[in-house]
Amino acid sequence: MTSRSRFGQTAGGTAALRSPRRRGGGVQSRSINLFYVPTLLVLIVFTVYPLVSGIQLSLTSWDGYSPEKAFTGVDNYVRMLTDSTFHLVLLNTLVYGVGSTLIQQVLGLGLAVLLDRPVRGRAVLRAIIYLPVLVSPVIMGTMYYFLFQYNNGALNTVGAVFGVEKTAWFDDAGIAVAIIVIVNSAQFVGISMIIYLAGLQSIPEDIKQAASLDGASGWAHFRHITLPLLQPAFATSIVLNLIGGLKLFDMIKVLTGGGPGYATNSVSTYISVAYFNNQAAGYASAMGVVLFVLILTLTLALNAGLNRNKLEL
């Protein structure tokens, strides 16, 4: 009887001790959830609300100033199908996004591999390569504008010393687009380098040593050991660079202003032209929605492809 009562007291005491823990855990969980509220508010105010408003405006013929917003349905989206200028800037946007991403991956990975080795002064070199990332694209674009400027530009000035005729770099649309891609890549290659450096330094030493013992060295080691283990770094770097390239705005405005004509505009810069110059806010909103869908689609497809490749490896 005594043992039973003791057992009952012990069980009851244990239950009594456990009960407050569960209640306390629930209170603690609710308290932690409250920390998400500010983030959710910021997300709603600065992301969800502008997106919903943009979709609503894309269905109107609003000029951006008048209080009246006449509903036009999908007319703005139909207009894009026949707008040759939009087709051009959409192609430019893909060139800026894909071109910049490819260049930054190749250069970023190469620099990361080089500066992951015990090279003298590598810390300084890493800082120098990453430094342009911290500079505003407007400042960077201005610096390169004076490099390629027709009159008194650095390239044409140096060329004149050697008897080379001046080149109007920004008068040719193809050359101007290539310059924008190169300048954008040069500024942000440091991001890719840092991501790949982190990936290289996270590879366990025992895997490297095991590969060396198996006879893997040089290119074979890099191809069969390093590259597969860098899949997470590839995914992060490619997605970030692609999104940045597809949204390119500042660099284009400073270097070419979208010219000659509309030849170097991206969708982002053409949106500003449609809104402020042509007073077609509804059409500009429709292009913004299309750009959002384009970035979202490419990002999701890219992530799915990279994740599938990671699983296969």
Image (cartoon, rainbow, N blue to C red):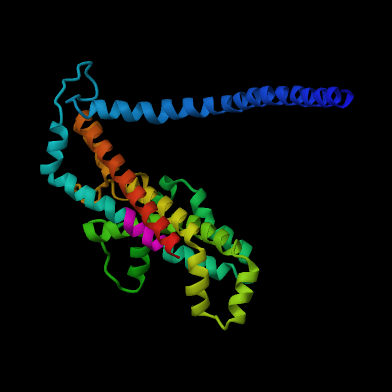
Is 249 on the left-hand or right-hand side of 24? left
Q: How would you classify the magenta stretch by its main secondary structure?
A: helix
Residue plotted at (74% across, 24% down): 15
Q: Position of residue 252 (x, y in %)?
A: 32, 48
Q: Position of residue 214 (x, y in %)?
A: 58, 81
Residue 265 belongs to the span the image colors magenta? no
In the displayed structure, 66 sits above or below 93; it is above
Q: In which quadrant of the rendered view does residue 203 lie?
A: bottom right
Q: In which quadrant of the rendered view does residue 58 lie?
A: top left
Is 61 on the left-hand or right-hand side of 188? left
Residue plotted at (36% across, 71% down): 161
Which sits in the foreground, 153 or 104?
A: 104
Residue plotted at (53% across, 26% down): 38
Quarter of the image where the N terminus is located: top right
In the displayed structure, 115 sits above or below 35; it is below
Return the residue found at the far front: 1
Residue 99 belongs to the span the image colors magenta? yes
Q: Position of residue 296 (x, y in %)?
A: 33, 44
Q: In this picture, which residue range is highlighted in magenta?
A: 97-104
Which sits in the foreground, 165 or 63?
A: 63
Residue plotted at (31% across, 46% down): 297
Judge whether residue 147 can be spotted in this image.
no
Judge whether residue 30 can be spotted in this image.
yes
